[in-house]
Amino acid sequence: MTGDPTVAVFRPADERIDEAAALLERLGVDPLPDPMLEVDPTGASPRADADYTVLTSKTGVELAAEAGWTPAGAVCAIGEATADALGAAGYPVDVLPDTYSSTGLVDRLVGEVDGARVEVARSDHGSQVLLAGLEGAGAYLHETVLYRLTRPEGAGRAAERAAAGALAGALFTSSLTVEHFLAAAEQRGVRAAAVAGLEQAVVATIGRPTAETAEASGIDVDLVPAEADFETLARETVAALE
């Protein structure tokens, strides 16, 4: 799609990066897929004796299902994508917050988890907001790390394009994608130039925590959609380019 603006996307190195690139193409831009996350399963399974089990990602649900996990209590999804994955795997969705975030889920559970056993099953880079909030609500908390998120070998093509001033947009979907982007830029010797190059691009993030991570590292954030999903992020970014 020569001649169209180039938008970098940093989704995990699986079907999500392919789906993201396909969506950007349909929206009329030239996608630059540069996965900044790779899933490394730990082989662990969520506890099966909890009163509440919190799952925070599609990947976590899929790994729990592969492990043959059977929940005993209420199943909580942090957002719609996780809820959809639970449904696809045959699990119930007993709790879904109005606001799809760690804070939103804590707000939803306050008042009913005091004294309850709460299992949080997720990656090794989960937000501490969730744990602190549930503990503050009186829950007996246990965390299981289902997978680790690493930076794929070879990541950083987008950092070089940014350094050359050749990116029109950049879509960051978590704080870790920001951190890995900067680490890849550093490894390639272009960190300062990449950050400077992003000033000429539309930088969009899912959620304020991701925006805060970017801004703390010197990256100006132009757009944080009200809805925390990738399609909204992509559509609003492309609209901002017009």
Image: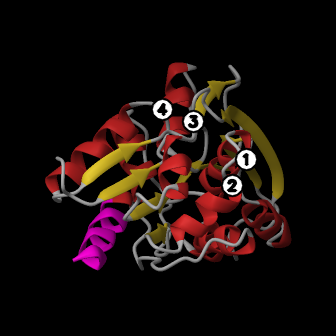
The segment highlighted magenta reads 231-242
Looking at marks 3 and 4 on the same chain, the residue that comes earlier in the sequence is marked by 4
Q: Residue at x 46, y 61 (%)?
A: 165
Q: In front: 67, or 157?
A: 157
Q: Residue 17, located in which quarter of the rendered image?
A: top left
Q: Secondary structure at mark 2?
A: helix
Marks 2 and 3, the one that precedes in the sequence: 3
* Residue at the spot 19% in from the left edge and 50% down from the top edge: 25
Disc 4 marks a residue whose amino acid type is Ala
* Distance CA(mark 1)–CA(mark 4): 20 Å
Residue bearing mark 4: 13
User: Where is residue 231 shown, x and y percent of the image?
Assistant: 30, 60
Label 3 Cα neighbours within 10 Å, binned few <14 / some 14-19 / many ≥20:
many
Sequence-wise, the earlier of marks 1 and 4 is 4
Under tag 3, what secondary structure? Answer: loop
Number of numbered discs present? 4
Q: Amino acid at mark 2?
A: Arg
* Res 191 label: 2
Tag 3–tag 1 contact (CB < 8 Å): no
Most foreground residue, 96 or 40: 40
Residue position marked by numbered label 1 in the rendering: 186
Disc 3 marks a residue whose amino acid type is Ala
Name the secondary structure under disc 4: loop
Give the overall secondary structure of the magenta segment. helix
> How much space separates mark 2 and mark 4, taking CA atoms?
22 Å
